[in-house]
Image: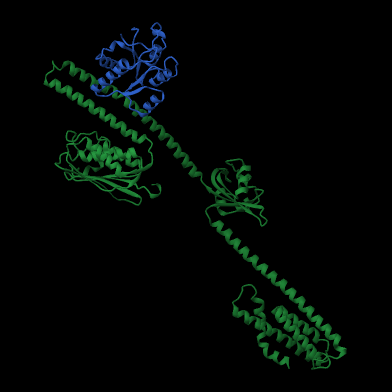
């Protein structure tokens, strides 16, 4: 496992993972991505548990979070992150297929930094992912305790 | 002066006067008969004294010298009894004069010898006493008769009221402050099954096994405070079945203001309650169904969109990746794939928006249709700058409704009009309002577009229903279904008129805003 994943992608659909990484690759950010396939794995990563027990302790610079996930769903993951002293500063972007107002409202209530609906059109999708990657990884200064920018 | 002669002449009147006098006591007669009656009473007073004097003289001549005194006294009594105080005084005075004139020495003179003076005084005192006594007696008799008549009247009124209470369909009974039933109407017999004979005298609470919605003491306190109480009560009929009644109580106080009785009106609402419960249960089921549908729509949003996105994405990647090795046909196939994926994305979005209308809460506010139409027109125009459209927009009223929803409905109607006039060199679109039913406004959107065949008008507002080939006019076929749903949620109707190639008019009705809320 790479020790300095600056993007934690929490996504269960392999095709979405593939497409997201393809999009991020345009800015050479593909190898910054750590993929968690469900909510539980995401929390394991964040808390350095299980298979991630030995990883370096920095937080990712951004979490791209799907809402509909096996085991622990996205909103639950978000809730836990926001209620943990060490994790609550991590920027979280919800990246979902759901246009439901309900999901949007709950996400913002839980303190999400951005809410992005995956566009059907691939161009738009690539653009959205690229912009997300560029903004949160390359432009934004992550909070202290996060994986630093590449030198 | 011979009173006896005068009296004899007047005798014919006597029976008439007497019978009238005793009859006409209670109903107050008009002014003229009153004068007549008192004249007759005075006449009678004169006549009876005259008769008594005449008879006395006759008997006196026969040697019965003690008889005239009681005869005159009786005559005074008769005059007072029949005529009252005024004729009584006249009779008394005449009797005294007659006694003085005819029956004291010297006879036929108003002088009295000293020997008869005591007799005369005794006669006067007796006459006055008899007169006073009879007039008292008469007063008492009149009072008694009046009281009797009043009582009869009251009884008649009460009887009538009681029979009216019996006529009503409502269940009415009265109980005293100890809860004992004192009145029980026919409605109560019919509802509860006990006859009034069975019910009267029993404790209402025990007989009906009343179940109160609150502690009885509280209800009773409220009744005493406000003199009224209403609520729903559980009762048990004679056959043991339970009923729910809507009960209204009124407190009656006696003449001293003390609580005396409680009148209870009860309406059987068992059936209504049962229906209400049934409706509530159906509502709960409906709500559960709606939740299920909502969950379905939600997962549709999520689950259908993901694979669709993948189809689109990989088609595009393929396009990018293999465009050099593909021939013209292959490139066209990929373009069609992408087009279809986009179309399906639009369909899913529209369908979800449509389902949201059914679920969303409508906010009821005052909405200016004028402004909404302007907004809708400028929104639709934004995508159709190249088109030549003549707008004719009339004045529109304010309505009550959900602004966002009504706006969506208007945008759909206007964009439809713009879409189906796209084949016209100059499109003409008219928006206005007409009178509907009272309190209602009818808004119409008329175009000179391709129109439609009225044969298919019933299909116009169905989901995914289209009357034109999709190459001719793009669209998902949800627009008018959405309009209908929005209008229906606002309590209105939608309808349309059209002629093939002759334009179409869409109408919807909405509730007119009343001035007081503006």
Residue A17 in the image, given as x and y percentages of width and height: 29, 15
Q: Which chain is blue?
A: A
Side of B119 where A29 appears, left or right? left
Q: Quadrant of the N terminus of chain A?
A: top left
Residue at left offset 58%, top offset 61%: B160
Q: Nearer the viewer, residue B40 or B267?
A: B40
Give the total of numbered labels. Answer: 0
Name the image quarter holding residue A136. top left
Q: Nearer the viewer, residue A110 or B45?
A: A110
Please say if B438 is above or below B418: below
Residue at left offset 67%, top offset 77%: B22
Residue B407 in the image, given as x and y percentages of width and height: 30, 39
Residue B234 in the image, given as x and y percentages of width and height: 56, 43
Q: Nearer the viewer, residue B479 or B409?
A: B409
Please say if B472 is above or below B496: above
Q: Is residue B59 visible?
A: no
Residue A146 in the image, given as x and y percentages of width and height: 37, 12
Q: Colour of chain B?
A: green
Side of A3 where B194 appears, left or right? right
Q: Quadrant of the C terminus of chain A?
A: top left
């Amino acid at each position: 496992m790479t020790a300095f994943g600056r993007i934690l992608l929490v996504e269960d659909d392999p095709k979405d993972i593939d497409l997201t990484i393809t999009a991020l690759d345009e800015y050479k950010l593909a190898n910054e991505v750590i993929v968690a396939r469900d909510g539980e794995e995401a929390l394991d990563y964040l808390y350095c548990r299980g298979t991630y027990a030995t990883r370096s302790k920095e937080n990712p610079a951004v979490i791209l979070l799907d809402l509909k996930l096996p085991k622990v769903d996205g909103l639950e993951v978000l809730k836990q992150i926001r209620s943990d002293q060490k994790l609550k500063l991590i920027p979280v972007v919800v990246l979902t297929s759901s246009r439901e107002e309900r999901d949007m409202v709950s996400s913002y209530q839980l303190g999400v930094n951005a809410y992005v609906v995956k566009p059907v059109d691939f161009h738009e999708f690539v653009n959205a992912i690229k912009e997300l990657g560029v903004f949160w990884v390359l432009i934004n200064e992550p909070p202290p305790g996060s994986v630093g920018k590449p030198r | 002066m011979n009173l006896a002669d005068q009296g004899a002449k007047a005798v014919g009147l006597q029976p008439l006067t007497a019978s009238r006098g005793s009859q006409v006591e209670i109903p107050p007669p008009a002014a003229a008969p009153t004068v007549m009656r008192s004249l007759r009473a005075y006449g009678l007073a004169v006549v009876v004294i005259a008769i008594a004097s005449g008879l006395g003289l006759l008997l006196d001549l026969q040697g019965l010298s003690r008889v005239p005194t009681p005869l005159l006294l009786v005559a005074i009594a008769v005059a007072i009894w029949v005529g009252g105080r005024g004729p009584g005084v006249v009779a008394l005075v005449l009797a005294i004069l007659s006694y003085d004139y005819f029956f004291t020495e010297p006879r036929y003179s108003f002088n009295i010898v000293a020997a008869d003076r005591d007799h005369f005084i005794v006669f006067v005192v007796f006459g006055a006493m008899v007169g006073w006594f009879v007039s008292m007696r008469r007063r008492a008799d009149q009072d008694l008769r009046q009281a009797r008549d009043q009582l009869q009247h009251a009884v008649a009124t009460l009887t009538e009221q009681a029979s009216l209470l019996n006529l009503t369909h409502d269940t009415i009974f009265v109980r005293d402050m100890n809860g004992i039933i004192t009145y029980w109407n026919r409605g109560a017999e019919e509802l509860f099954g006990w006859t009034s004979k069975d019910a009267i005298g029993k404790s209402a609470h025990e007989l009906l096994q009343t179940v109160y919605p609150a502690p009885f003491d509280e209800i009773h306190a409220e009744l005493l405070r406000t003199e009224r109480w209403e609520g729903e009560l559980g009762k048990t009929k004679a056959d043991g079945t339970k009923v729910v009644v809507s009960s209204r109580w009124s407190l009656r106080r006696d003449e001293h203001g003390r609580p005396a009785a409680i009148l209870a009106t009860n309406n059987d609402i068992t059936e209504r309650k049962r229906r209400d419960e049934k409706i509530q249960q159906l509502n709960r089921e409906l709500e559960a169904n709606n939740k299920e549908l909502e969950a379905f729509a939600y997962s549709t949003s999520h689950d259908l969109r993901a694979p669709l996105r993948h189809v689109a994405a990989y088609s595009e990647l393929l396009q990018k990746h293999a465009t050099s090795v593909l021939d013209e046909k292959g490139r066209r196939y990929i373009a069609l794939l992408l087009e279809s994926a986009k179309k399906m994305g639009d369909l899913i979005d529209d369908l979800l928006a449509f389902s949201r209308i059914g679920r969303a809460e409508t906010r009821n506010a005052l909405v200016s249709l004028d402004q909404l139409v302007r907004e809708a027109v400028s929104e639709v125009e934004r995508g159709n700058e190249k088109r030549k459209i003549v707008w004719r927009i009339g004045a529109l009223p304010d309505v009550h409704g959900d602004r966002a929803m009504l706006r969506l409905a208007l945008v759909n109607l206007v964009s439809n009009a713009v879409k189906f006039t796209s084949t016209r060199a100059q499109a003409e679109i008219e928006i206005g309002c007409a009178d509907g039913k009272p309190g209602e406004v009818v808004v119409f959107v008329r175009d000179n577009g391709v129109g439609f065949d009225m044969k298919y008008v019933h299909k116009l507002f169905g989901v995914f229903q289209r009357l034109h080939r999709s190459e001719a006019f793009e669209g998902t076929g949800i627009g008018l279904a959405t309009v209908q749903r929005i209008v229906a949620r606002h309590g209105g109707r939608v309808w349309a008129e059209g002629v093939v190639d002759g334009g179409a008019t869409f109408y919807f009705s909405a509730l007119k805003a009343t001035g007081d809320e503006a």
